Amino acid sequence: MDDANDPHLAMRATVDLLDEVLDVAGLESDARATAALAIAFCDRLGDRLDADQRAAVDAARCYWSQQDRTGRHRWHAVYASRLVQQRHVLSPVDRLVWGSLVDNTGLTGYVGEFLVLEALDAGLGLDDVEAVLCGSVPGFAAARVQKPC
């Protein structure tokens, strides 16, 4: 397989581009940006989320849109407990759901890479991941046009 068709290299190029974009985006203190990216990945996963995961993401969406805080607090407690009890066995989807619920982590290159890798592990293809990044990370779409992955 040549380098142009190597999926690992394509994924690495996408993560590297995301890191470059986030390095200058000024989102390192913006927990809303982190949650928005996690929510977008969960939305793209669609029916692969179970009922509890969908309810948690919906609660996060309501929280971040200032509609309701109680649902998010409830699901945050549920997932925090799961994280403590099952840290090494949480599914990639559960980790993305957790990312939609946390409100203390800005969107850095490290966090962006984590979410991308979890989305890939959850079953999204690289095209889906890039579509989410183009729609959720300011500057990613323009950078991708200038420097195709």
Image: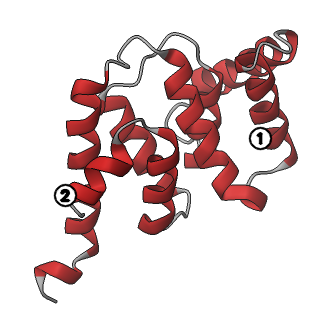
Q: Nearer the viewer, residue 88 or 54?
A: 54
Which residue is rendered at x = 20% and y = 47% of the image? 16
Foreground tag (1 vs 2):
2
Residue at 42% x, 57% y is 130
Which residue, as the protein is rendered here, is positioned at the far bottom? Answer: 1
The image quarter containing residue 53 is top right
Residue at the image point whose x is 52% and y is 51% from the top:
132
- Judge whether 8 appears above or below 76 on screen: below
Q: Which amino acid does the dot numbered 1 rest on? A: Gln
Give percent across and percent down for residue 141: 38, 50
Residue 139 visible within the image:
yes
Up/down of 109 relative to 48, above or below: above
Residue position marked by numbered label 1 in the rendering: 53
Q: Which type of secondary structure does the marked residue at label 1 adopt?
A: helix
- Picture disc at residue 147: 2
Residue 127's place in the image compared with 117, above or below, is below
Quarter of the view holding residue 52: top right
Nearer-N-terminus badge (1/2): 1
In the drawing, does residue 69 fall left or right of residue 12?
right
Name the residue type under label 2.
Lys
13 above or below 59? Answer: below
- The kind of secondary structure element at disc 2 is loop
Disc 1 from disc 2: Cα separation:
35 Å
Colour style of the rendered protein structure: secondary structure
Image position, residue 92 (x, y; %): 55, 47
Classify 10 Å Cα crowding around label 1: few (below 14), some (14-19), many (20 and above): some
Foreground pick, 118 / 33: 33
Q: Image quarter for residue 65?
A: top right
Residue 50 location (% of width, % of height): 81, 50
Percent position of residue 71, x then y: 86, 18
Instruction: Answer few, some or many: residues within 10 Å of disc 2's Cα (few below 14, many 20 plus, some between 14 and 19).
Output: few
